[in-house]
Image: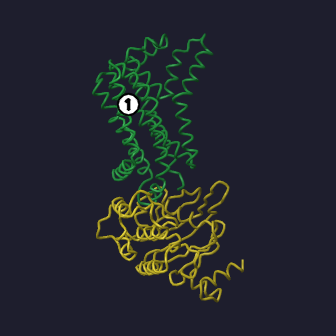
Chain colours: A yellow, B green
């Protein structure tokens, strides 16, 4: 579904992505992990067209995303740090996104809005929100349009335990519907029951891309955190 | 595109600066027209104020607005929208607001007190100047990632267009006083939209005799139909080129 071929991106002298090639298929739930600054967010932003890569290309369903923009209608993106127009209220942001996407009300998935209790604070301005509430708005927006692909950049960072459980349950239901889910996270323990594949990145390169079963077999560890720790020690 | 322009304009109206700018222009124009017994004289005084204030406010406000809406831009870029649509909507939203503010603030008093050819010329150039400086500010804002740097560049550009450029022209004129530079001066004016607007309006006002020999040359050139068409084309070029360059830059910008 999403195929990146030899993607490179430099920010000044720093090589954020170095010849990255990756294939993500429908129905997979992929964890993108690696140390800070290894290029996870840059890779995600390149797939969304927010960062324009220097060389290589990314295709979405066979179309190069460079000259395409409609494909973004099929992606729900939850950024690491949600940045919204500060003087708008939550309700206005939601309405604006619905208006821009031109969605009819019946296709919307407003489950997260109600589960997070966002409908009670629709009148609050974005500038007054706490980090966690902002994160809830981002999550609600990512799932709102029933997208085929979900890209979640550290979805549970800053969420309270109850909300992060709600979000995880939601991710699992969407995954079971056959959607492609791409998650980055540093909390490996919470990925255990979500993911089917792991991509491990370091210094802008992909170290490995394996299915979770494969990884467990190779390392003999059932837990993802331990398996990854073993792989990292071996290197 | 219409939807995004709508959101940009709603957002601009919500922060009251443009409103304050409109009221300020309105106060100045009405005061000036009431102070002078001859409204043609009033127009001349208004001209000098407008040529300073309109570029400054258009540029500063647009640059700060573009920086402050970086979140909004980031949000829109991850949506199924063309970058071109996003940037042009921002440009049209800003231009429409600034031009509308000028029209209400200065245009209506001009039409009320001095609805002559000169008045219309001033209204037209004022509207064009508003849009030109929105385009220039957006170019500066997309080139410089750092907010302080971008706004600094905008202020320097304003200084250049309103003060330094005239200084340079005077310097060249005095240094090469022995050479016939009049025709070159006509060409040089094309590099500064503010000067071009000023000359266009002054020529309509019959005060061009004060400008001496160069004034006669200007009158010869800008007074004719073709001169007028050429100068407006130059002014429109001042909108199109910065807007186009900024669009190209924005298309490849990392957010």
- Residue at mark 1: chain: B
Query: What residue is shown at x 60% (from left), y 59% (from top)?
Result: A9
Instruction: Please tell me which residue lies in front, A172 or B71.
Output: B71
- In the rendered image, residue B195, in percent from the top left (x then y), is placed at 47, 25
Q: Element type at marker 1? A: helix
Q: Is residue B113 left or right of residue B83?
A: left
Query: What residue is shown at x 39% (from left), y 17% (from top)?
Result: B223
Residue at the disc numbered 1? B28
Name above or below for residue B64 compared with residue A162: above
Where on the picture, by quarter, is residue B155?
A: top right
Where on the picture, by quarter, is residue B163?
A: top right
- In the rendered image, residue A20, in percent from the top left (x then y), is placed at 60, 66
Q: How many marks?
A: 1
Query: What residue is shown at x 46% (from left), y 62% (from top)?
Result: A63
Instruction: Please tell me which residue lies in front, B144 or B244.
Output: B144
- In the rendered image, residue A142, in percent from the top left (x then y), is placed at 43, 69
Q: Is residue A81 left or right of residue A174?
A: right
Instruction: Please tell me which residue lies in front, B185 or B252.
Output: B185
Image quarter hosting the C terminus of chain A: bottom right
Name above or below for residue B106 compared with residue B203: below
Mark 1, other Cα within 10 Å: few <14 / some 14–19 / many ≥20: some
- In the rendered image, residue B2, in percent from the top left (x then y), is placed at 33, 50
Where on the picture, by quarter, is residue A187?
A: bottom right
């Amino acid at each position: 579904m999403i195929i990146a071929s030899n993607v490179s991106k430099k920010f000044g002298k720093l090589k954020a992505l170095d010849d990255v090639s990756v294939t993500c298929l429908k129905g997979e739930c992929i964890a993108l992990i690696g140390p800070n600054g290894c290029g996870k967010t840059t890779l995600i932003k390149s797939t969304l067209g927010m960062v324009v890569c220097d060389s290589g290309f990314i295709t979405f369903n066979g179309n190069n995303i460079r000259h395409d923009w409609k494909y973004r209608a099929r992606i729900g993106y939850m950024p690491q740090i949600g940045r919204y127009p500060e003087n708008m209220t939550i309700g206005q942001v939601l309405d604006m996104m619905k208006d821009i996407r031109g969605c009819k009300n019946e296709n919307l998935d407003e489950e997260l809005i109600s589960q997070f209790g966002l409908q009670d604070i629709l009148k609050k301005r974005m500038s007054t929100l706490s980090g966690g509430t902002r994160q809830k708005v981002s999550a609600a927006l990512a799932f709102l349009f029933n997208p085929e692909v979900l890209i979640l950049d550290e979805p549970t960072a800053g969420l309270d335990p109850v909300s992060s459980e709600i979000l995880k349950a939601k991710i699992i239901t969407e995954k079971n519907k056959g959607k492609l889910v791409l998650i980055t996270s540093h909390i490996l323990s919470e990925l255990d029951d979500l993911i089917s594949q792991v991509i491990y990145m370091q210094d802008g390169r992909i170290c490995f891309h394996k299915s979770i079963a494969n990884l467990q077999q190779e390392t003999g560890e059932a837990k993802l955190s331990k398996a990854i720790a073993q792989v990292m020690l071996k290197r | 595109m219409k939807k995004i322009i709508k959101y940009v304009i709603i957002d601009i109206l919500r922060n009251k600066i443009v409103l304050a700018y409109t009221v300020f222009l309105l106060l100045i124009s009405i005061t000036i027209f009431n102070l002078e017994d001859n409204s043609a004289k009033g127009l001349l005084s208004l001209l000098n104020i407008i040529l300073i204030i309109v570029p400054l406010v258009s540029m500063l406000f647009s640059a700060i607005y573009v920086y402050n809406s970086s979140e909004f831009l980031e949000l829109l870029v991850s949506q199924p929208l063309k970058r071109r649509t996003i940037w042009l909507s921002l440009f049209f939203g800003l231009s429409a607001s600034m031009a509308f503010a000028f029209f209400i603030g200065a245009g209506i008093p001009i039409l009320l007190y001095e609805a002559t050819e000169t008045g219309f010329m001033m209204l037209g150039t004022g509207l064009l100047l508003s849009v030109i400086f929105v385009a220039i500010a957006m170019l500066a804002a997309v080139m410089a990632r750092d907010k302080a740097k971008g706004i600094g560049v905008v202020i320097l550009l304003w200084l250049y267009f309103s003060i330094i450029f005239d200084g340079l022209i005077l310097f060249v004129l005095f240094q090469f006083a022995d050479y016939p530079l009049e025709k070159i001066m006509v060409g040089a004016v094309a590099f500064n939209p503010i000067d071009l607007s000023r000359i266009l309006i002054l020529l309509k006002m019959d005060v061009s005799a004060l400008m001496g020999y160069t004034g006669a040359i200007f009158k010869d050139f800008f007074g004719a139909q073709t001169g007028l068409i050429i100068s407006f084309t130059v002014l429109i070029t001042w909108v199109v080129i910065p807007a186009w360059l900024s669009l190209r830059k924005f298309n490849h910008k990392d957010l």
